[in-house]
Image (tube, rainbow, N blue to C red):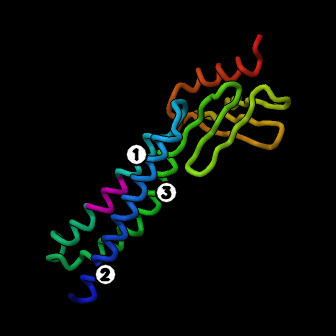
Amino acid sequence: MDAEVILDIALGSLLGAAHAFVIVTSVIWRRRKYRKGLHYSAIGFASLLLSSFFGVFLPIGGFTFLDGGKSGTKALITALVFCPWLLVSAVRGICYCIYIDGTEVVKKTLLREVRINLRDEGTTIDDSQPWTVTFWISINSGKNTTIQFNSRRTEGDINSFLDNCKKIQNPK
């Protein structure tokens, strides 16, 4: 085997291992930590699909169709440039949810969880931004903890979520 074949095997293995790691991590996180509420799942799955497309079909095309297989290494390197950014976006979207737990709003990501008690003194819900098409919602606690999300990327019933937050905050 020459050096280019060894490089192709190493780069292909690295690319495959990165995709496998993201898929396994996402499946485990969704089984253990995901709660129904607001989420970014479609963006995450679309990024994973696009990354898989670049990571699989681009090298296959380089090895089989372009220049009789001489462009395979170049296609692998190109895939390694695009895929990491898409994989990060995939993990961020798949491993993300916001939900209500009792009197708290919880934002879970892959490595972090933020909780804001809606009944604490100084907690505010800001959803008043009439100058934009997609509005930002910000829930601030008195302890400088903030949960922010926008209506453009967020999936789920945002209006119902905000109504439930306001009912918990002001139980009249």
For the residues marked 2 and 1, what is the alpha-carbon distance in whole angstroms?
Answer: 29 Å
| CB contact under 8 Å: marks 2 and 1 | no
Q: Where in the figure is residue 106, as x and y percent of width and height?
A: 64, 36
Left of 80 or right of it: where is 123?
A: right
- The tag earlier along the polypeptide, 2 or 1, is 2
Seen in the picture, residue 96 relative to 123 is either above or below; the reply is below
Relative depth, front residue between 81 and 119:
119
- The residue under the point 70% across, 17% down is 167
- The tag earlier along the polypeptide, 1 or 3, is 1
**Which residue is identified by label 1?**
45
The residue type indicated by label 1 comes to Phe
Left of 31 or right of it: where is 11?
A: left
Q: Where in the figure is residue 161, as x and y percent of width and height?
A: 60, 24
Relative depth, front residue between 23 and 138:
23
The residue type indicated by label 3 comes to Val
Badge 1 element: helix
Badge 3 element: helix
Left of 43 or right of it: where is 122?
A: right
Q: Where in the figure is residue 63, as x and y percent of width and height?
A: 20, 72
- The residue under the point 45% across, 52% down is 25
* Structural crowding at the residue carrying mark 2, measured as other residues with C-alpha within 10 Å and reported as few (<14), some (14–19) or many (≥20): few
- The residue under the point 51% across, 46% down is 95
**Which residue is identified by label 2?**
7
For the residues marked 1 and 3, what is the alpha-carbon distance in whole angstroms?
Answer: 11 Å
Q: Quadrant of the N terminus?
A: bottom left
| CB contact under 8 Å: marks 3 and 2 | no
Looking at the rendered structure, which numbered label has been put on residue 88? 3
Q: Which residues are magenta?
A: 50-56
* Quadrant in the rendering for residue 19: bottom left
- The tag earlier along the polypeptide, 3 or 2, is 2
Seen in the picture, residue 93 relative to 79 is either above or below; the reply is above
